[in-house]
Image: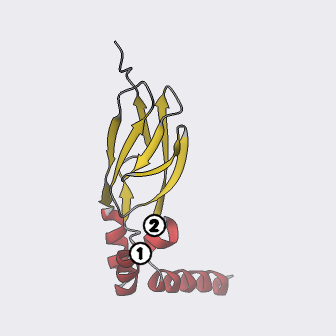
């Protein structure tokens, strides 16, 4: 039993040293849901069309995004999603050693998006 526990601890330590903490547990993308009232608005992310609401996408966590909602007869709506560094992941990586710091920094796994849901209410162009 002691050998099994010791082996598990050693393997966990080795994995943490050769991979980044955030890379193991989070990855480098985040799920984001896009909704509008009324539904069926076209969603453009950084100027590129991605589909109509309701929509669920995986976005890179180390980038910021400009989201535009367009629907005929309604005023366009623009929202921003920003990328932020998760300080907890940085601290865990520094404790685990230099390799995790490099891996998570290069993969962008330290980052997270400041929104998981983008909900907008579209206003009619005609009063």
| Residues at discs 2 and 1 in contact (Cβ within 8 Å) | yes
Q: Nearer the viewer, residue 117 or 10?
A: 117
Image height of 16 relative to 22, above or below: below
Q: Nearer the viewer, residue 112 or 88?
A: 112
Whole-percent x, y for residue 23 in the image: 47, 72
Instruction: Work out how far the residue at label 2 is from the one at label 1, CA to CA, in angstroms.
Output: 7 Å
Q: Residue furthest right?
A: 1
Point out the image quarter for the C terminus: top left
Residue under label 1, please give it: 107
Q: Which of the marked residues, 2 or 1, is nearer the chain's N terminus?
A: 2
The residue shown at (39%, 20%) is: 124
Whole-percent x, y for residue 110 in the image: 37, 67
Label 1 residue SS: helix
Mark carried by residue 28: 2
Image height of 3 relative to 75, above or below: below
Whole-percent x, y for residue 96 in the image: 39, 80
The residue shown at (40%, 32%) is: 120
Label 2 residue SS: loop
Q: Can residue 21 be seen in this view?
A: yes
Q: How many labels does the image show?
A: 2
Image height of 51 relative to 30, above or below: above
Q: Image quarter for residue 79?
A: top left
């Amino acid at each position: 039993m002691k050998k099994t526990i010791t082996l598990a601890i050693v393997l966990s330590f080795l994995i943490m040293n050769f991979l980044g903490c955030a890379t193991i547990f989070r990855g480098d993308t985040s799920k984001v849901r896009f909704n509008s009232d009324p539904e069926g608005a076209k969603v453009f992310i950084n100027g590129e069309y991605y589909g109509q609401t309701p929509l669920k996408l995986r976005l890179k966590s180390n980038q910021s995004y400009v989201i535009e909602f367009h629907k005929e007869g309604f005023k366009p709506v623009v929202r921003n999603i920003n990328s932020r560094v998760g300080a907890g992941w940085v601290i865990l990586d520094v404790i685990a050693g230099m390799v995790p710091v490099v891996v998570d920094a290069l993969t962008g796994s330290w980052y997270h998006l400041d929104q998981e849901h983008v909900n907008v209410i579209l206003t009619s162009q005609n009063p």
